[in-house]
Amino acid sequence: MTKNFNNKVHNCFIPSASWIDTSYDIKTSLRYQQTLFDLSEIYARRFRKDLKDNRKKLLKGTDFVKELNTKQVTDFSKRRIDYDSETQFGTNKIMQERWESLIQLELDQLKEFAVVEK
């Protein structure tokens, strides 16, 4: 296993499984979707951090990994509800900008756990 599990946990965008409502402001919709992806990246990084912090438990088995994953997925889901509500799905520009700033700050704080593409 790697030192920080960065290459073991992925936050993926699947273009073939994606769509966007073109009857609305496409620029706003894309900005909302990008921010949502960035929000999910926070939880991928937190999961990598949790794995690193608990790596000694791997010697006893991997059952705890499912618990860590479930916690991050649940936390992300709750946070997404807040994001969607507060930004009105990205249409409230002031709140959208606040969320973008907050998310960027959190991503910066977790940069050690980012996947670096080669």
Image (cartoon, rainbow, N blue to C red):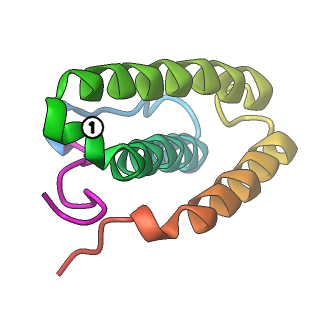
- Relative placement, left or right, of 10 versus 100 is left
For the point 34% across and 27% down, the residue is: 69
**Mark 1 crowdedness (10 Å alpha carbons): few <14, some 14-19, many ≥20:** some
- Relative placement, left or right, of 69 versus 41 is left
The residue lying toward the viewer, choosing from 111 and 102, is 111
For the point 36% across and 50% down, the residue is: 48
Badge 1 amino acid: Lys
| Depicted 3 relative to depicted 67: above or below | below
9 in the magenta segment:
yes
The residue lying toward the viewer, choosing from 102 and 7, is 7
Q: Position of residue 55 (x, y in %)?
A: 29, 48
Magenta residues, start to end: 1-14
Q: Position of residue 66 (x, y in %)?
A: 26, 22
Q: Position of residue 107 (x, y in %)?
A: 57, 60
Residue 11 visible: no
For the point 74% across and 53% down, the residue is: 102
For the point 45% across and 22% down, the residue is: 71
Q: Characterize the magenta stretch by its predominant secondary structure.
A: loop
Residue 86 found in image quarter: top right
The residue lying toward the viewer, choosing from 27 and 112, is 112
| Depicted 117 relative to depicted 58: above or below | below
Q: Which residue is mark 1?
A: 57
Q: Secondary structure at mark 1?
A: helix
Q: Position of residue 117 (x, y in %)?
A: 22, 75
95 in the magenta segment:
no
The residue lying toward the viewer, choosing from 65 and 29, is 65
Residue 28 visible: yes
| Depicted 102 relative to depicted 39: above or below | below
